[in-house]
Image: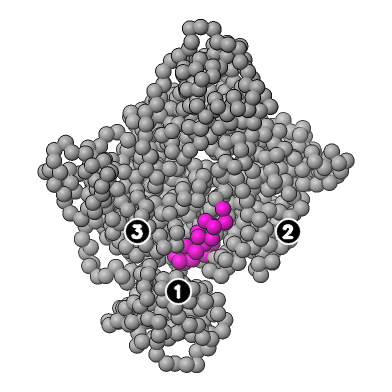
Amino acid sequence: MKNTQVIPVIFSAALLSAAPLQAHQFNQQTELQTFASNARFEMAVVSNFAAKAGTFSGQLQLNNKSAQALAAGSGNWQIYFHSIRRLQLTAPAGLTLEHVQGDLHRLAPTKAFKGLAAGAALTVEVSGAPYLVTYSDFMPRAFIVAGKLQPEVFSNTDSEDFSQFVAPLRRPEQLYRYQQPEPDLYKVATAQSRFQDNLAVNAPLADDSSIADQIIPTPQQQKLLGGKLLLDQQWTIRFQGRLKAEAAYLQDRLGLAGLALKTVPGLADNSARQIQLRVDPALTTAESYRLRIADNRIEVSAADNAGVFYGLQSLLALTPAQFSSISLAQQEIQDSPRYRWRGMHYDMARNFHGKAVTLRLIEQMARYKMNKLHLHLTEDEGWRLEIPGLPELTDIGAQRCFDLTEQRCLLTQLGTGPHKSGSGNGFYTRDDFIEILKYANARHIEVIPEIDMPGHARAAIVAMQARYQRLLKQGKKAEAEQYLLSDPADKSKYMTVQNYTDNSVNVCMDSSYAFIDKVVYELQQMYRAAGLKLSTYHMGGDEVGAGSWTASPQCQALFAKGVPGVAGVADLKPYFVSKVAALLHSRQLALGGWEDGLMYDAVNPFNREQFANKNVYANVWDNIWEWGVADRAYRLANAGYQVVMSHGTHLYLDHPNETHPDERGYYWAARYTDAKKIFGYMPDDVYANADKTRTGAVIDDLEQLVGRALPKLEKPENILGVQGQVWTETIRTATQLEEMVYPRLLPIAERAWHKADWEAATVSATERMKARDQSWQRFARAMSEKELPKLSQAGVHYYLPPVGAEIQAGQLVANIAYPGLTIEYSLDQGKSWLRYQEAVPVRAGAEVWLRSRAVDGRNSRLTKLPETQP
């Protein structure tokens, strides 16, 4: 992760010129550009320990370092900025503060504005909810507009370096979420706390056998036979005809590592020094395989092509990142997956990161035997897939900029700023998507498209409104209304969790279902063009704003028709799902949705029998233990739905890696989620994962905490598997994305493929913890010593944990969460660096800098001793 050096920002009372300011309007683009280039727009958290629980106080500052004064009174300028918390003024400042939509806010001068002299600073006191404790809670690219001039970004905010526009978070009231009615028990990580936390994983292994034979994910059975086998350029890859693609994949992967082997179809030749690939009818479990390395031969046999592919991944896992020949331990592996669903969800709708990073994700998923890629293609903030015949979806819905009419683009959000060149804009073309489908299929990964509705649909709604206006001007009223998703006469009032008031598709309009059918049709054509068949469509369905459709004439008309089961607003969500399910059933598609999209309330799922689809599955995500909804996985499974474990507390990779303000990510489900925590997740026993509340209090009795009986799982056959999620509100670049996903993807793959012995229900809590920690030791070492170099070779920017360190009896001692990573230290403020290998004598009072370092030359953020507040 990028090392951010935080510089102090001083927030003072307004410094105003004693002399009257010359009246001035911004009339020239150069004036506005010069002002934005020199003035500084800055933000700060004053305190999360506000008088009203769950709120914070903050400040915005305009520091006028330009030579141009802002005149008193209501000028022709406004300042727009992004804030994930909805803000309000708490002290008069001659300005209005307005929440526009989503995270976009606007400051504008009033008649009471006293002006701002050159060289002066104006502080604006604000408040909001809930708390802000990390730098990534703030968004870049604040900008100023004036009349018809082009908006200009404040140059200090046009950066991913938060220190340029966010005041330091140093005091307890800035670093912790709350103090009342109970304290925040999650302590900010320090060098010393990291050092103590890392002791166990750095201890000598109980089993000191070589890490070289460790495979991630762990095979079901692995037996070493004794002896070695030399794999070099003299070998040949022979394959059964149906396995041509798998043989080519192996050849390509070995070639990238430095070993060039020929491929030959057919298995008739039984000579030595062959890698033989075959499908064995005797193996009946899907995706299972047998790998034998012995007698100067390597044999991969499997139940199907996917099983052969996974056998090849295990073979490749035994090799280093680079080699021209390698000595392999002779061994036999028999392996089958724990779950048939081993997935990863990727949201590129909030912020688009490009095709290349998507392909890298697919490749790494394949390496770790993951088989489902859930692409979150649409959101309030963006539509990311070209749909033939609906150009507005990407012409407008895939672009954010400053256009209050939203006829050219969506309202800017999430730090994009006013220009289309800002971060997060873009989309997959139809050809891009077909390429992605082919690439994934070659690696036995199914791509599941999600078009999120009826909530989270603002990009589509705005795009179809623009289409409506375009066609209406051409006199094509019927065509304009064909795919309209909103009713102009709908006066419903609501505010979503993400602060939108207009993102719900009107589920009472026939045109909404015509739109969905059109999109599904075009998706099917893309899959067919890739030589595939679309089998599953994910409708989203989550977080619909409470109050949607309550004042919709279209819905009142629907109720008046007397449609069975549609008597009022509470019936509209299941009505929507039923309509979508019927549409998909006619196209022979399975239906997927987020858990709350398939439930009336916290405990009651929709009647499963109303959906004709053979398969309807739910991603179960909301497991905040004290909220009493963590039993939804079992409630849905027992009600006949299939379930994919997607729990926020353990499987959300947009959460911070540790409790520290420099760590990126949201923290609504868990204050942090590191790789060790994911490794310890137990998908077969949901309640056993209840470790702490959101405050950090230890949970000893979940049933007592919830206050009611917790249902048991009656239909385990309905649990499909495990899926990791990455949401990208705070993730604007491809590098940031990969640093959040990797290497935490690896323990997700581990738990989805392999059930550890310590997960057994018969194991006591004490025994489980001890065995799990020992298992994590080996896994962490294999991950850092074997897998991270391969990620580097593939161009993946994985997260590098900061160093843990202490000064003990005049000596520096240091360790790292991923043993095997290089630790470096500096005694001259970074002018020179030395590799840490053992305790280092340091003089009293000396300043020590430390960092971890990857083989690709990247560094972690700095750790400093003696340590001050972050």
**Amino acid type, mark 2:** Tyr
> Could you say which quadrant of the image residue 568 lies in?
top right
According to the picture, the residue beneath numbered tag 2 turns out to be: 521
Label located before the other in sequence (3 or 2):
2
Residue 378 percent location from the top left of the image: 62, 48
Stretch in magenta:
354-372
* Residue at x-position 33% and y-position 69%: 214
- Would residue 363 be counted in the magenta stretch? yes
Q: Position of residue 237 (x, y in %)?
A: 47, 83
Residue 855 marker: 3
Choose top left, top right, bottom left or bottom right for residue 55: top left
Identify which residue is drawn at 23% across, 42% down: 828
Q: Is residue 51 visible?
A: yes
Q: Nearer the viewer, mark 1 or mark 2?
A: 1
Q: CA distance from mark 1 to mark 3?
A: 20 Å
Q: Residues within 10 Å of mark 3 (few under 14, many from 20)?
A: some
**Callout 1 touching callout 3 (CB < 8 Å):** no
In this rendering, which labeled residue sits more in front, label 3 or label 2?
A: 3
Number of residues whose C-alpha sits closer than 10 Å to that of mark 2, classed few (under 14), some (14–19) or many (20 or more): some
Query: Label 1's element?
Result: helix
Q: Position of residue 556 (x, y in %)?
A: 76, 36
Give the answer, above or below, for where 395 lies relative to 405: below
Q: Is residue 106 visible?
A: no
According to the picture, the residue beneath numbered tag 1 turns out to be 255
C-alpha distance separating marks 3 and 2:
46 Å
* Total tally of numbered discs in the picture: 3
Q: Are marks 1 and 2 in contact (CB under 8 Å)?
A: no
